[in-house]
Image: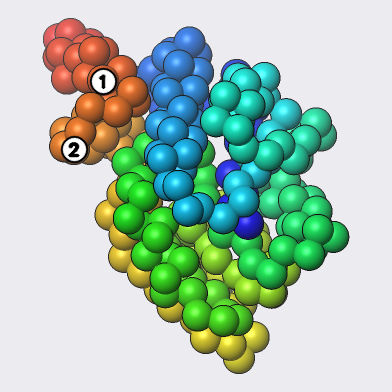
Amino acid sequence: MILIPVKNLENAKQRLSPVLNEEERRELARAMCEDVLETVAQWSERPTTAVVTGDSFALSLAKRYEFEIIADDANPGETGAIEMATSVCKRRGAKSTLVIPADIPLVEVWELRRIIDTADGHGTVLVPDAAGRGSNAVWRSPADLFPLRFGNDSFLPHLAAAQATGLRCMVLDLPGIARDVDRPEDLEALAAADGNRRSQELVRSWRLKEREQVFGD
């Protein structure tokens, strides 16, 4: 089962506040979320997919793309949301979970297929972020093989936890999944990357380099 946690988008991406105001951060978070869900929806043979959220915009997208919804009304953060959703998956008899975030707008269907194709039986597949610090995709089988603890430096703890299980653990370098948007410099990389996804067009429309020049004078 694919799990996509989406926290409250109204106050998302606080680390971008040096360059984006509150409305822009919300608009970007929504655009990225839609980019991710649209890409997953294009994967016709995908596993059952659930959006874990209590956010009204994410809920509307999940319904539009006919994904399942795991209600996250408490909004405890990504770690708490996935812990709750994993328990739901276990109760439903899911043999595995693939967790991906809603802020990897350049994700490609072929990358998601690669994870599933690499996942052979029981074990773990990890995809780190571009800096090698965060975890931008985690496949586990059994579904609750080890607890997930997300944050800026989650990759190495997840890798250690996966290896401690004694089961197969694979690490993949997938450029679209690796490219999340958390820091101001990530905005430039998103705008410069090939493609015309909603989030890219949005960031390009802001002309942030010109904005920097104005404020720098």
Please name the residue that numbered disc 1 is placed on.
201
Please report contact status of discs 2 and 1: CB closer than 8 Å, yes or no: no
Per the rendering, the mark at residue 36 is none
Quadrant in the rendering for residue 213: top left
Q: Indicate left or right for 144 with 207 as reference.
A: right
Please name the residue that numbered disc 2 is placed on.
193
Helix, strand or loop at mark 1: helix
**What's the amino acid at mark 2?**
Ala
- Is residue 161 depicted above or below 12 in this figure? below
Few, some or many C-alpha atoms within 10 Å of disc 2 (few <14, some 14-19, many ≥20)? Answer: few
| Residue 209 position within the rendered picture, expressed as x and y whole percent measured from the top left | 17, 20
| Residue 167 position within the rendered picture, expressed as x and y whole percent measured from the top left | 58, 87
Return the residue nearer the eye: 144 or 79: 144
Residue at x 55%, y 66% (from the top left corner): 139
Q: Indicate left or right for 39 with 166 as reference.
A: left
- Is residue 41 depicted above or below 191 in this figure? below
The colour scheme applied to this rendered structure is rainbow
Residue at x 31%, y 65% (from the top left corner): 173
Residue at x 24%, y 13% (from the top left corner): 205
- Quadrant in which the N terminus is drawn: bottom right
Task: Pick out the residue farthest to the bottom.
Answer: 166
Ranked by sequence position, the earlier of labels 2 and 1 is 2
- Quadrant in which the C terminus is drawn: top left
Is residue 36 shown to the viewer in this render? no
